Amino acid sequence: MIVFLYGKDTYRSFEKLQEIITQHKNKYGNSLNIEFFDEKSSLKELLDCSKQFSMFTSKRLVIINGGFSVWSENKEFSKSIDNLKDSDDVFVFREEALLKSKIKIIENKKEKGKVMLQEFSILSKEKLFNWTKNIFIKNGTEIDNDAVSHITKIGGDNLWRIKSESEKLSLYKKKITKKDAEFLVKTDISANIFNTIDAIGEKNKEKALSFIYDHLAKEDHPLYIFSMIVFQFRNLITVKDLKERNTEYNEAKKKSGLHPFVFQKSYNQAEKFTFQELKDLYKKLFRLDLKSKTGQIEPTTALHLFIFEC
C-alpha cells in the first residue's frame, strides 16, 4: 500500500505522519519494523527494502521523506510503484511542493485500498484561527479570541511557529489575554536565545550577559526573554533524555516533536551540558520564574541572577 502526503503545510503533514507511526506501533506493538528513507537515500536502497521479507509477521511501515521528488523521473521507480501498492507493507511518501505532473504519477495508480493521497494546503483564515485555539484547549489554557488573532497574524501560514508560540504561552499562564500575546509573540524574534544558551553552556557569564543586554536593547520584554530561555531548556532536556537513551538521530528528531531546525540546534547544544546540569538549571529557572511572576523579584533581576548562578 502507498500513502502519499503532500502540500505546503509541512506541519500538518508531519503531524499526520506521526499519527500513522503511532497507529502502526499501537497495532503491531513493534518499532523495529519501521524503516526511514529520505532524499539522500538511493532508489536502490528503497527498492531493495521493498523486496526484503520482514523477520516480523506484522506489516512493515516504510517512511520516505522527500525521496519522491528526486526519484519521480526515474523509469525504474515509475515501474516499481505497482509493486509498492500491491505490497502487504505500507509505504508512506511525504513531500512539500510538487508539480501537478509529478502528482499524476501517483494519481494514475490510484486504487481503492491500495493508494491514498492527502494534500495539506495552507489553512484558510477561519480554519487557522480554530486550529490555533484548539492548541490552547488541549493544553487546558483559556485564551481570548483577540489573543488568538494576534498569534495567527504574526505566525501567518507558519504552523511550526504558531505551535511553538502557543505552547510557550500555555506555559506562561493558564489564561491568556491579548496583552499577554502582544508582548510574548513578536513580529520579529530578535532574541537570539540559542547564542545565550551556548554561552551558558560554555560557562561564559560575561558573553551570556552581553546577549541578554542585546535583547533588552532591542526592547524585548524581560518576561519574553525569560520564557524563551525556559522553553529552550525544556527542549534541551527532551533531546538530552533521548540522547541518554541512545536514540538514533532521525528517530530522536521524530520523537521530540520539535521543528527540524530547533531540534538540530538543541541536539548540538545538549552536548555542552550533562543531564544533571540541565535539570539543575531548569529548577533554577522555575524558581526565578515563579518569583518574577508573583512580584517577589523584577524580571530583569531574575535574568541577571540566573546568569550569575549558572
Image (spheres, rainbow, N blue to C red):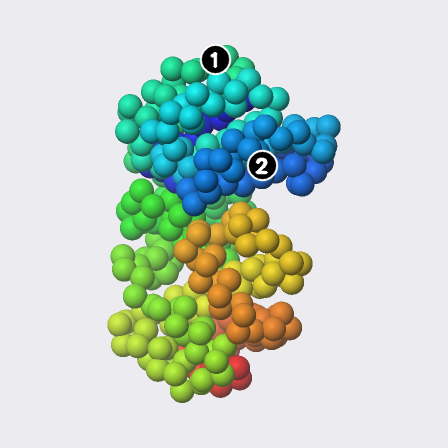
Q: Is residue 278 visible?
A: yes
Which residue is at a point 38% across and 15% down the rendered structure image?
108
- Reply above or below: 292 against 33: below
Which residue is at a point 35% across and 53% down the rendered structure image?
178
- Reply above or below: 150 against 268: above
Task: Point out residue 265 in the picture as x, y percentages from the top left corner.
Answer: 44, 62
* Front-lying residue, 220 or 51: 51
Q: Is residue 303 visible?
A: no
Q: Is residue 11 left or right of residue 233?
A: left
* Front-lying residue, 250 or 191: 250
* Residue behind mark 2: 21
How many marks the image carries: the answer is 2
Q: Are marks 2 and 1 in contact (CB under 8 Å)?
A: no
Task: Point out residue 293 in the picture as x, y percentages from the top left corner.
Answer: 48, 69
Task: Point out residue 112 in the picture as x, y percentages from the top left corner.
Answer: 50, 12
- For badge 2, the amino acid type reads Ile
- Reply above or below: 203 against 51: below
* Front-lying residue, 263 or 306: 263
Q: CA distance from mark 2 to mark 1?
A: 22 Å
- Which residue is at the far top? 112
Q: Secondary structure at mark 2?
A: helix
Which residue is at a point 44% across and 52% down the rendered structure image?
260
* Residue behind mark 1: 111
- For badge 1, the amino acid type reads Glu
Quarter of the rendering occupied by the N terminus:
top right
Count residues near mark 2 (Cα–Cα under 10 Å), then give few for <14, some for 14-19, many for 20+: some
Task: Point out residue 233 in the picture as x, y percentages from the top left corner.
Answer: 52, 66
Count residues near mark 1 (Cα–Cα under 10 Å), then give few for <14, some for 14-19, many for 20+: some
